[in-house]
Amino acid sequence: MEFSGKHYLVTLTTSAILATGTVVSLAVPLDACLNARDCGASGSEYSTTAATTKGMKDITVTDPGDFKVGQGVMLSECNPRCSKQTLWGPRHVVVMGRPLGDKAEIRGYDGTQGDWLVLLLDVPEKTNTFRWSEDLSRTWKPAVPITGDWQPLRDKIEVRFNKHDWEKGYTVAFSLRGQLVTVIEKMDGKVVTLRDAPTRTVGSAVLRHCDDVALQTAIDRAVKEKKNLHVPVGRYRLAHGLTVRNAAGITIEGANAVDTVLDISEGEGACITLSKGNDVTLRNFTMVGHSGFAERDQCGYLRTLGSSYFWGFGAKGCNAVTIGSTERVLIENCHGRRMATECFVSGSVSRGTEEKPNPVHCKLTTYLRCSAVDCGRNGFNDVMCGSENTSVLYCRIVDVGGCAWEGASRFVKFVGNYVRNSGTVAMGNLGPANHDETFPKLGAGQHIIADNVFESNVPYGGCAIRAAVGATQVHISNNLFVNFGSSAVEVSGQSDATHYPSANTTISGNIFDMTEIGEKSVARTAVQVSAADTIVCDNQFYVRGTNDSNVTAIKVTEPVINVTVHGNLIRNCGVGIASGRASSTVEKVVDALTFLPGRRTLPLDHLLASQCRGWRLVWIARGKPAGISIIDEVTGAADPGAVQIKLKEPREMKTGDIFEFIPPSANWLFHNNTITDCLQPVILNSYGSASSILRDNIVTRTTAVGIKQAIQVRGNFQLLGNHVTGFDEPDCAALALFEDRFGNVPSNLYRDNVIEKCAVAVSESRKGLWDEKAASENTVLNCGQNCSRRD
């Protein structure tokens, strides 16, 4: 932009755009900005081949091109070394890789085996053997005994395991590099003198520009001088990431996002890391790494037999931007490609407590008009609960092998984005490592997920949106799901010894087009609810064309409590509304009355010292009830690892025993929904309660065929004021009544329902389910049979 003969850096005021729809530009003269070129950054894509001699700083290049004295360069194949070695484990311990030290050694890498080789050595628990992989666990060489001496891998590479408690299960990662990163000190025709001598003779090494040192110099100078930084058009290759440290206020801006590229495909780390500071803006960059969607299996969780916690990106990682406790951040029009780690990631300490406040933490982070495309892991991520007010706005997330968004943080807005063929928008994920002492009072995982478009399917995570393990106060609204071949939304109440349950969710105003346009339709659910205090309202669910028996519109799973489902329009699905049961297990028996649960489904409040008194606990053996206990109390909810269930009466128990919960009052209300042309419109297949109510719903059939029952009742539910019509195929029942899970007649009410134009008004699996006292003031019109018995 030019005014009065001067060039300007244009800064857009984001708040003005969002609040009013208009663009307010603040023109900053470019001559007031520091230019990265003035600090030696080349931005050149040029490369050439070079002949190197071991121990000699002089190399001979094919064509010197635009290389200059003083510029940073990277030279392939000529500097073989082990650049990183880490130890993961022991098994059953959640810990990232740490320095290997002298516990194991490697030798024999000379560069002929590859310019970048990552080797994994996997020692299974309770063994004295190891297996190894050179493709990040896609394939493994057979296990062999550990001898304590040098043992061959391939092509002269050998490893040695030294004394250590290997039998506890560990995984070792070696990163072997042939790259030399150095500086040009002198040029004489085709002879280039480097600061550092190659350690290997190579006939045709590749010489490329390397701009990380020059760009880091520019950033440091801009921070010190309190100037903004302009990065001209160019491709800036990085061997190591850049860091913005303690900036009081800085804007780092590329000339444009298409032609200003930070390329870390030959390096590791984040293209840009923000470390503390007050206010940072990044704008107009494309950032390119080395591992895309096709490598997602190598970047994610690796199922090693040694360490039980190994992520591929820990052995070979790169990402676009990392934020570490910077107070205010705006990242605008920045685009990540082929990133192995979370493309855009933040990890911040929290605000602290009243007694110990922490003023330096992420208070406001905005990603605006950014994208993550063709990446191995997550698109956007807040790792810790400490970050606050992160907004992902109008971004594009396509072909991402991990989560589209993953957030343990607070007060998040994920709004106006487009997501296709990418993993889950995951809220919560609060475990022992990412929450702190602020959690009991402040909670975490509060999210608004609104006005987004989700297309096609989900390759990772099982559904498009999930609130789980600790997410509270979640609003999912006005999203579009287009040709959706995967499950869409799940709010999960499941937890375990290291995670908190989720609760307090509203799902409203969304349109779920669950039509599969690919070759194969798979079982999927549009909305699945097992988290307490959930409202599902005013949504549309449908399949275009013929019915899809694999699609369930809404499923609610016990022992969730306080669920309201109303005002939804459900059409042409396999199942309209369904209920089900979830089981838990005994992890450890304390005494005849008390045990620790393993996988658990209880809707616990971590602020209550004692809860769930009077709940029934149904023991399950061979898939059927095998006894009932009454809960005296559940304690320890403040610490997931300390949760204990105490029974009123003693019982013989053992680890692994399976059980299900029945709350005294479930408080389920399904009302004013329209369900039409679904193959199984309503399935109430759970324990239920006196406060489990199906009321004022319209359930119809017009063109669907093969329907056996309109409403199935297999538990304690009250059916009031529903209108069921059109189920006139032979033997099709409007209401199909069954015994409950215990083989008993549930104490249900059937009142003020209208059943018309159905082959059978009511069918019973045994006499007495349609009791005249419980079934009164119902209207049956134009039905073939009023009541039939199904043995």
Image (tube, grey):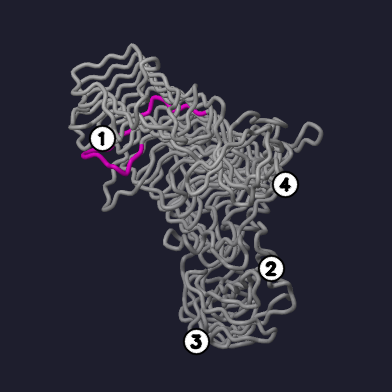
Instruction: Name the foreground residue: 207 vs 397.
Output: 397
Residue 25 in the image: x percent, y percent? 50, 33
Which kind of residue does numbered mark 4 sit on? Val
Q: Secondary structure at mark 2?
A: helix
Q: Secondary structure at mark 3?
A: strand
Which numbered circle lies on residue 590?
4
Do callouts 3 and 4 mark residues in contact (Cβ within 8 Å)? no
Magenta region, residue range: 534-552
Q: Residues within 10 Å of mark 2 (few under 14, many from 20)?
A: some
The three-letter amino acid code for the residue at tag 1 is Lys
Residue 83: x and y in percent read 63, 72
Name the spot of residue 513 as percent of width and height, x first: 31, 37
Q: Earlier in the sequence, mark 3 or mark 1?
A: 3
Q: Are marks 1 and 2 in contact (CB under 8 Å)?
A: no
Residue pictured at 67% horizontal, 82% vertical: 160
Q: Earlier in the sequence, mark 4 or mark 2?
A: 2
Residue, disc 3: 203
Q: Could you tell me the amino acid type at mark 3?
A: Gly
Q: CA distance from mark 1 to mark 2?
A: 56 Å
Mark nearer the N terminus (4 vs 1):
4
Q: Are marks 2 and 3 in contact (CB under 8 Å)?
A: no
Residue denoted by label 2: 168
The Cα–Cα distance between marks 4 and 1, rounded to whole angstroms, is 48 Å
**Mark drawn on residue 708:** 1
Whether residues under marks 4 and 1 lie with C-beta atoms below 8 angstroms apart, the answer is no
Q: Nearer the viewer, mark 4 or mark 2?
A: 4
